[in-house]
Amino acid sequence: MLEPSTAPVPGLTVPVNQLGRRPGTSLRLKVEFTAAEGIGTEAISIAAGKPVKLDLLLESVLEGVLATGTVRSEAFGECGRCLDEVSTPVEVTFQELFGFPERAEPGLEDPDQLQVVDDAIDLTAPVRDAVVLSLPFNPLCREDCPGLCSECGARLADEPEHRHRLVDPRWAALQDILEDEREEI
């Protein structure tokens, strides 16, 4: 799995000062950025340099800013059975509350709670988490992909009649004796 980045991505740090601190105000934004690094897993991910689009709704609530968004892009990887290239559209929604630091109750601060910092929110972690969780664990080029031959590695989709003559390992020694006798004749 790719290591998560902790550095903010420039296109994903969104200013929220237009919302003010009045609960009930909202702001709709469309953000487009280029993935600075892969977002996903080793099997499939949105590759670095690929465009990612966000539709955001930012709402001011009593505790902070509620960010609701839809991420759209395309992920690339390889089939888990035949190793062919796979591409799949990514469209996933997320919702995250960014707390105002001064609103946290003393002694009850949640270290995992995302915060509004300098009137801006960093959407890197929520976007990454939503994308990774939406991607298939074992991507396939097609649902009925037959994969590769376990004996020789041949692509079974190209050779549907591909077979090997398998000898029961318990009889393999006798098979060798028969072959030696045939060579002597």
Image (cartoon, rainbow, N blue to C red):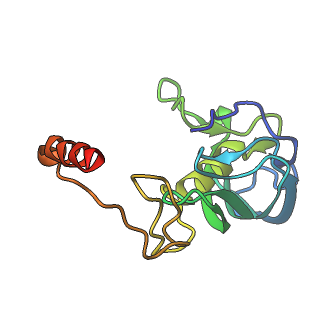
Is residue 181 rendered to the left or right of residue 121? left
Is residue 119 rendered to the left or right of residue 176? right
**Residue at 82%, 51% in the rendered image:** 20
- Of residues 97 and 167, the one nearer the viewer is 167
The percent coordinates of residue 185 (x first, y second) are 26, 50
Q: Would you identify the image quadrant in which residue 31 lies? A: bottom right
The percent coordinates of residue 68 (x first, y second) are 66, 62
Q: Is residue 179 visible?
A: yes
Seen from this angle, which residue lies furthest front? 185
**Residue at 17%, 52% in the rendered image:** 168
The percent coordinates of residue 164 (x first, y second) are 35, 61
**Residue at 13%, 47% in the rendered image:** 171
- Of residues 79 and 17, the one nearer the viewer is 79
Residue 3's place in the image compared with 147, above or below, is above
The percent coordinates of residue 105 (x first, y second) are 53, 32
Q: Count numbered badges in the picture.
A: 0
Q: Is residue 63 visible?
A: no
- Of residues 2 and 76, the one nearer the viewer is 76
Task: Identify the image quadrant of the N terminus.
Answer: top right
